[in-house]
Amino acid sequence: MEPLIQFRGADIRNGESVVLYGLDMDIFPGDFVYIVGKVGTGKTSIIRTMTAENRLLNGEGTVCGFNLRGIRTKDIPFLRRRLGVVFQDFQLLMDRTVEANLEFVLRATGWKDKGKIDDRINEVLADVGMETKAHKKPHQLSGGEQQRIAIARALLNHPDVIIADEPTGNLDGETADGILQLLRTLNAEGTAVVMVTHNRAIFEKYPGRVFACSDEHCAEQLEDDTFDLELTI
């Protein structure tokens, strides 16, 4: 099985500074992967490299068949269509309805047929249990509902991988649990998930592969490894 995401000896940057040296990582179809570590250890910089927001200058990296070292600017939108990105702060357009938020993304990524657009919006809202919220604006929704809409947005273009950057960081424990259960369901249906978190309780309750970032390095923690990160409980 070919990995969807692969890094070999990759130096991960935040701006001009290297924050992680020599990253080796393979993420395969169907994986649920956590990237964990304290704030400032390079977790988010890894996913920004995956989306080609941060350029890869040293080492090798491929995402969904795109070579991150040589990717052309005009090809970056095509890479990002293969990924579904979920943010901590939702990043919804507050002056538009849920339906209009999702339609905006589809049209921006090349969808033109109104009937197909409507069908796809209905499908992803049903996937996240939000089919009755299409005509609401984000401010009329709870934080958990907004995050479900953000996940629906990430699903629109049938992504190979969902990349979630602290998706439960602004949510209470019960609501966060619901979001994790949703991501696990999507993963069980075949979509790989890469989730950044500093909350140890999450990856202890919902096990997956764990890459731990500390001291300018990030490495996978195997089942018989022990590691002591000062993470939020």
Image (cartoon, grey):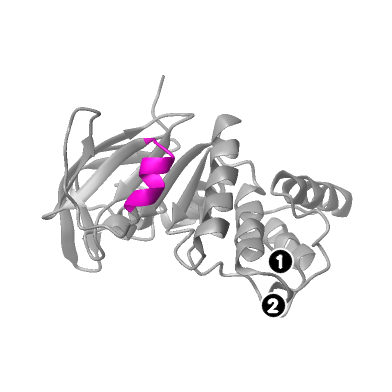
Question: 191 or 83, which lies in front?
Answer: 191
Q: Position of residue 84 (x, y in %)?
A: 54, 50
**Predominant SS of the magenta segment:** helix
Q: Which mark is residue 139?
A: 2
The residue sitting at the right extreme is 115
Q: Position of residue 28 (x, y in %)?
A: 41, 29
The amino acid type found where label 2 is placed reads His
Q: Left or right: 137 with respect to 221?
A: right
Q: Position of residue 214 (x, y in %)?
A: 16, 53
What span is in magenta? 200-208
Indicate yes or no whether the magenta region holds residue 103: no
Q: Which mark is residue 101?
A: 1
The amino acid type found where label 1 is placed reads Asn
Residue 68 visible in rendering: no
- Name the residue rendered at 51%, 64% in the picture: 172
Indicate yes or no whether the magenta region holds residue 205: yes
Give the answer, above or below, for where 146 lies relative to 217.
below
